[in-house]
Amino acid sequence: MKRYKRYILYIGICLGLFVSPFGTNCAKAKDFVVVIDAGHGGHDPGAVGQISKEKDINLKVTQKLGRQIRQNCPDVKVVYTRNRDVFIPLNRRAEIANNAKADLFISIHTNSVANGRSVKGASTWTLGLAKSEANLEVAKRENSVILYEDDYKTRYAGFNPNSAESYIIFEFMQDKYMEESVHLASLVQKQFKNTCKRTDRGVHQAGFLVLKASAMPSILVELGFISNPEEERYLNSEAGSTSLANGIFRAFLAYKQEQEMKQNGRNGTSLSEAQPAPKETAKVSPSALPQERIAGEVIFKVQILASSRPLAKNDKQLKGIKAEYYREGGLYKYVCGASADYDQVSRTRKKLSNKFKDAFIVAFKNGKKTDVKAAIEEFNKNRLANQQE
Ligand SMILES: [Zn+2]
């Protein structure tokens, strides 16, 4: 009997997984792998400040970022190069990413300068040739971790992290992931500046060994300066590490969504294809859109955001706006203010722009997304025709 009950329970769970929109994500293999690399660890403290060590700041932000991704992106596999205070050789970190066939490699570090207590701010780096002495210094400091490894001379083919000549290998290097890496880096900096309110030190290139060995788009983030007492306090505060992790997370999400759009194309997803929302999420119901029942009529809507998962009605991201979603490219795209009157939707977009500054107008015809430019032209043509009547 017991066995029978367990069997029923098992079937129930399977069915539950099968019908739930989350379940479909759980059941399917993770299709995006991100490796998050907390710099330094173990007997390598990284840069040392007055009250803390770089390795601990890096790990904290790494774990918070990983948690955000795991909670919000069920289709993403998160791999850590280290999830505790342990020493990992530099080339092992890249190897972990390569073995995991990662789509993205994010290395997290904290900056430091000698005799520069007032120097502050966040920067993001990609692989390349350093354009300045200061940039080269950052790479030298980060690459010097290999000196903690006994056999670094053989392992890194005679590379001397402190000699400028060694960096000539970065001069003739081809990096086919450069464009994507630089793009992600700029998304991260945008977040650091706009939402984390950090001093923006920009996107730079330098010869980082760990980025050279990883065969995928890769960035190295310098969260801030541990050598600046004020910034060190911020980096060690819960609010600080959370804000920085969330900033990187938002950049990651934007990057991933763009990649998906590139792969899936922008058009052709039907509203009627929208999967049923889980109970507690904002619901799209075709009956809530009576205008769309008129065959051939174009309906304009304001798209306010896209999410990799359905959002609860009271989700903070919706900022109190009642929105419905349609699905496209694996994303839940939230729209509101549906109307056949483009001018009205245009006004709605304007009103919403203080809450959603990137809001834009999309158009639907017979429940399917349609080219918005053509739809606006058609609207204007009809308006002119009506005025002439
Ligand atoms: Zn570092």
Image: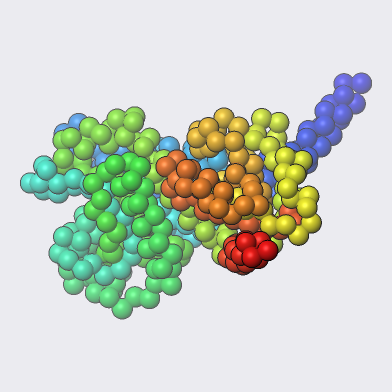
Which quadrant would the C terminus be assigned to in this image? Answer: bottom right
Q: How many numbered discs sit on the rendered protein?
A: 0
Frontmost residue, 283 versus 289: 289
Which quadrant would the N terminus be assigned to in this image? Answer: top right
Q: Is residue 253 left or right of residue 290?
A: left
**Going by the picture, which residue comes out furthest to the left?**
115
Frontmost residue, 52 versus 355: 355
Residue at 11% from the left image edge and 43% from the top image edge:
118
Residue at 11% from the left image edge and 42% from the top image edge:
117
Q: Is residue 305 above or below residue 124?
A: above
The chosen color scheme is rainbow
Residue at 33% from the left image edge and 41% from the top image edge:
196
* Residue 285 placement: quadrant: top right
Q: Is residue 291 left or right of residue 335?
A: right
Residue at 45% from the left image edge and 40% from the top image edge:
355
* Residue 382 placement: quadrant: bottom right
Residue 244 percent across, percent down from the top left? 35, 41
Q: Is residue 180 left or right of residue 277?
A: left
**Going by the picture, which residue comes out furthest to the bottom?**
172
Say whether residue 56 is visible.
no
Residue 93 percent across, percent down from the top left? 41, 54
Residue 343 percent across, percent down from the top left? 55, 53
